[in-house]
Image: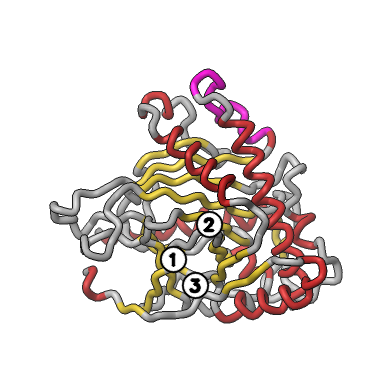
Amino acid sequence: MANETKYSDRTIPKISLRDFDARVDAIAASLAAAAETDGFFAVVDHGIPHSEISAQFARAERFFGLPDEVKAAVPYGRQNTGWEKAAQVRPSTGQPDQKESYQMRWGPAMEGAWLPEDVLPGFRAASLAFMGRVQAVSERLMVCLARGLGFEDDDYFVKAHDVADPDVQTVLRLLHYFPLDPEAPVPDTYCRGGAHADWDLLTLLFQRPGESGLEICPGRGAVTEFGLGDTWTKVEPVEGEIICNIGDLLMSWSDDRFKSTFHRVRTPRDPAVDHFGPRYSMAYFNQPIKSCQVQGPLKKYPAVSGEEFIQAAIRRNYAALEAIKAAD
């Protein structure tokens, strides 16, 4: 199965946010071009120091290093917050991703989802501060996306993702992929992260250099399709880069002009080139206020609320999983 994968050396566009206010028109044009043709791009000169990113990765390691029975005190639940372990099954594989994750949101959705301060001192305050830094970068990108789509209000997407609103659905997800023994055979059914597209507006992904595995596969023509292309590109982690990908929400909001791209975390199989050790990443999913209206400038799709869009994506994912079970 692994040998059938086709690869290409597709170039990932790099977008610098340097001198943002003076260069916003040029940045918006570059970002719109990347969103139309690639659906993925790397952001540099974003203003988050490497030391702050490393510190948040260290907090993630502290959290995941706790005993499972301690982490189980904040289980993943209906608020899309909390900890899960090997519980996420992708329709593309029918197998659970071999990872654990912890999801944090803004505001009241996190009630009961934080570990106590005496268990993880400083974790809550520092994580929220880091989320604020990533939100600031997200909002600059949202301004560019709004301009690229011709919305009159530069803050069109910013207002729809206002983290001060208690109904905003934005999430920071910490991820830990389990290590593998390079001397032992890896079962064909083992999946680190099955192929999928994100449901949100825009995802900002932080990776650690040396911990490879991310791959992308463009190819969808419409947000309603589940289809996958067959040619993948490896995205190696580079210090200082934030990897961004368009989500299904923005693909719909752009009337399918901006492309939501399938991606996965490759299962390591070749000790000479693959990373078998533990892999950590952090994904910031920009998800809208529940009550905001989602509809593109051309009105290709009926208007829905932010909550309705996310719930429809969840139902579509569930239906695909049920179809897999029925076929077995």
The quarter of the image holding the N terminus is: bottom left
- Residue to which mark 3 is pinned: 225
Q: Secondary structure at mark 3?
A: loop
Left or right: 322 as drawn, with respect to 308? left
Category of crowding for the residue at label 2, using alpha-carbon neighbours closer than 10 angstroms: few (below 14), some (14–19), many (at least 20): some
Left or right: 212 as drawn, with respect to 241? left
- Residue to which mark 1 is pinned: 263
Residue extending farthest to the top is: 118
Q: Position of residue 72 (x, y in %)?
A: 42, 28
The quarter of the image holding the C terminus is: bottom left
Look at 38% across and 32% down and name the residue there.
65
Q: Decide: is 88 above or below 124.
A: below
What type is the residue that disc 3 sits on?
A: Glu
Residues at marks 3 and 2, CA–CA distance in whole angstroms: 24 Å
Magenta residues span 108-119
Q: Decide: is 207 above or below 258.
A: above
Report if the CB atoms under discs 1 and 2 are less than 8 Å apart: no
- Does residue 325 appear in this view? no
Q: Secondary structure at mark 1?
A: strand
Q: Position of residue 25 (x, y in %)?
A: 78, 76
Category of crowding for the residue at label 3, using alpha-carbon neighbours closer than 10 angstroms: few (below 14), some (14–19), many (at least 20): few
What type is the residue that disc 2 sits on?
A: Leu
Q: Position of residue 306 (x, y in %)?
A: 68, 55
